[in-house]
Amino acid sequence: MPIRNGLRPMWWHGRFRGCGYRITAPREAILDVLSKSDKHLSAEEIYIKVHTYYPAVGLTTIYRTLDILSNMGLIFKFDFGDSRARYELSEGPKGKKHHHHLICTNCNRIIDYADFIDEEIKLLEQTEKELLKRYNFKSTNHLIRFYGLCEKCQKNELN
Amino acid sequence: MPIRNGLRPMWWHGRFRGCGYRITAPREAILDVLSKSDKHLSAEEIYIKVHTYYPAVGLTTIYRTLDILSNMGLIFKFDFGDSRARYELSEGPKGKKHHHHLICTNCNRIIDYADFIDEEIKLLEQTEKELLKRYNFKSTNHLIRFYGLCEKCQKNELN
DNA sequence: TTAAGAATGGAAATCATTATCAATAAGAGG
DNA sequence: CCTCTTATTGATAATGATTTCCATTCTTAA
Ligand SMILES: [Mn+2]
Ligand SMILES: [Mn+2]
Ligand SMILES: [Zn+2]
Ligand SMILES: [Zn+2]
């Protein structure tokens, strides 16, 4: 229950105000839903959850807020191929920062991973350096995904 | 001008028939357009081009055919974030097989590259091995993209 | 040549996301 | 606490890419 608490500003309030945005109940609720989920939620899924506590909030506001948050870099917006955008917190208490995804082609589960990116980072840097040399392409960001079978689906594989 | 040639079956005819599909003028035209382009075409762009020679072909057929080709693995279907699917040949004369993309965030140009550097190959192998160990995730495919500035846009950068 | 049913295209339907716009409320200043 | 400016909101309509329908046409095995 995302109770409005006027006394303690949340971790993102400052950042929000700094961009000239106002703090509103719908926005608090949306951030609350995102920070309490470890999944990759769609606008409608967020709408459903917010709706439980704030039935008055409209889907339009969900989209608008997600757009702002996305532009501010507070959330990531992904397209996993199911014809709807999916979002997840990128910072704050439960934020995951930059990470990559493992996608099970059987059960559609999406697994985040960032814990061994250190090893990957060195190789990525080298690759980016080489891309600059060969294609004169200056990379500033990347998207990396592995498709395959998750643990559970591999076991079921041996029906 | 994709002239229907009943005498010489194209390289994909066999594969097509093998899947139980019939060879038709619209399908030949679509494959023709794809094989003569080095871009990542949208359904509508393909429709426009096909339309030049076969005004009777409908957009519905374009979508249906692209779906078949995609499922057969003859073409790749990508989503580059401009809210429409984009396709490109994956095999045949000008097919590019598996490759990665460089995407210019300024001019939206998409650059294909398949001449992977050692670092990148090592990155993939090591990462996939580690993913199996840590997450029991068996990777069978991957999607890799670098976002940044292409050569041209870097120069314009220094307005 | 012929018949079975695969393929087609135009129109209507879907469905996620946007655009509109009048009503509402955040919050700076008093 | 009160006021005023204007950012924000939500209902509704509009968009736009992709699908679904279905009667008609065309491919192809026999
Ligand atoms: Mn994630
Ligand atoms: Mn490509
Ligand atoms: Zn799975
Ligand atoms: Zn560019």
Image (cartoon, coloured by chain):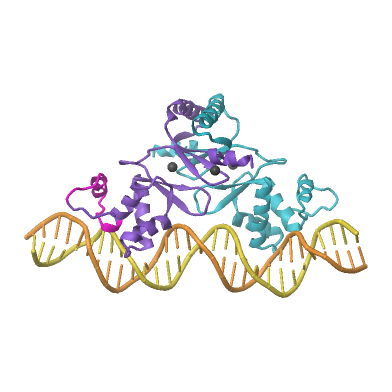
Chain colours: A purple, B cyan, C orange, D yellow
Q: Which residue is at the front of the view, A124 or B106?
A: A124
Q: Magenta stretch: dominant SS?
A: loop
Q: Is residue D9 above or below residue B91?
A: below
Inspect the magenta stretch and tell me whether residue B101 lies in it.
Answer: no
Q: Name the spot of residue B128 as percent of width and height, x first.
A: 54, 31
Q: Residue furthest front?
A: A159
The residue sitting at 66% across, 49% down in the picture is: B71
Whether residue A21 is in magenta: the answer is yes
For the residue pair B100 and B112, the one nearer the viewer reads as: B100
The answer to whether any part of residue A150 appears in the image is no
Q: Which residues are magenta?
A: A7-26
Q: Is residue B137 rendered to the left or right of residue A26? A: right
Q: Quadrant of ligand 2?
A: top right
- Residue B123 spot, x, y in % from top left: 52, 27
Whether residue A40 can be seen here = yes
The image quadrant where one finds the C terminus of chain B is top left
Q: Is residue B77 above or below residue D18?
A: above
A139 left or right, relative to A11: right
